[in-house]
Amino acid sequence: ADRTMNTVNKVVAKSMRTLRPGKKITIRMINPPAGVDAIVTVNGETVGNFGKGEVELTVYEGDYIEIDAVRIKKTAQFIIDTHKNDLVYPVDGILLENQSNLVVIGKVIFKR
């Protein structure tokens, strides 16, 4: 019963998200150039990896974005491209570098 309820809650949450306006952003991995060793999570759920060098995703107000870089053995760098959308955060063109296993991009904030 708990498993079924958890599945239903996830479906309802995803359906609710589609009713809200979203913005497209791209996260590019520039060092090392590409690899599946790093993954992007939004609100704790995996949404992609850097096998092609970048991940494009739709974000919503209040989403929390992180990059799990635990399997990368050297320093990794990422650039956020917001496509000039109306976002306060993350900032367009910001360069992030991993100092630990987790790169926290943070909470998405839209301009009002």
Image (cartoon, rainbow, N blue to C red):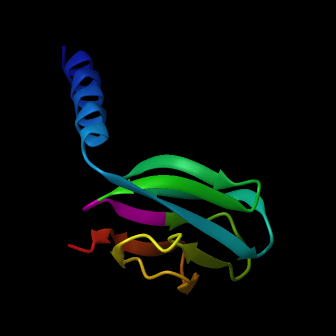
**Residue 69 appears in the rendering:** no
Q: Is residue 16 left or right of residue 73?
A: left
The residue that appears at 25% across and 39% down in the rendered structure is 19
Q: Nearer the viewer, residue 60 or 106?
A: 60
Quick one: 2 or 111, which is closer to the camera?
111
Q: Position of residue 62 (x, y in %)?
A: 25, 62
Q: Residue visible at 58% across and 81% down?
A: 98
Whole-percent x, y for residue 77 in the image: 66, 81
Q: Quadrant of the C terminus?
A: bottom left
**34 lies above or below 57:** below
Count all numbered tags in the image, as a single digit: 0
Q: Is residue 64 magenta?
A: yes
Residue 75 appears in view = yes
Percent position (x, y) of residue 82?
A: 50, 71
* 31 lies left or right of 93: right
Identify the residue at horizontal 43%, vertical 74% (top origin). Answer: 104
Magenta stretch, residue numbers: 61-66
Quick one: 58 or 52, which is closer to the camera?
58
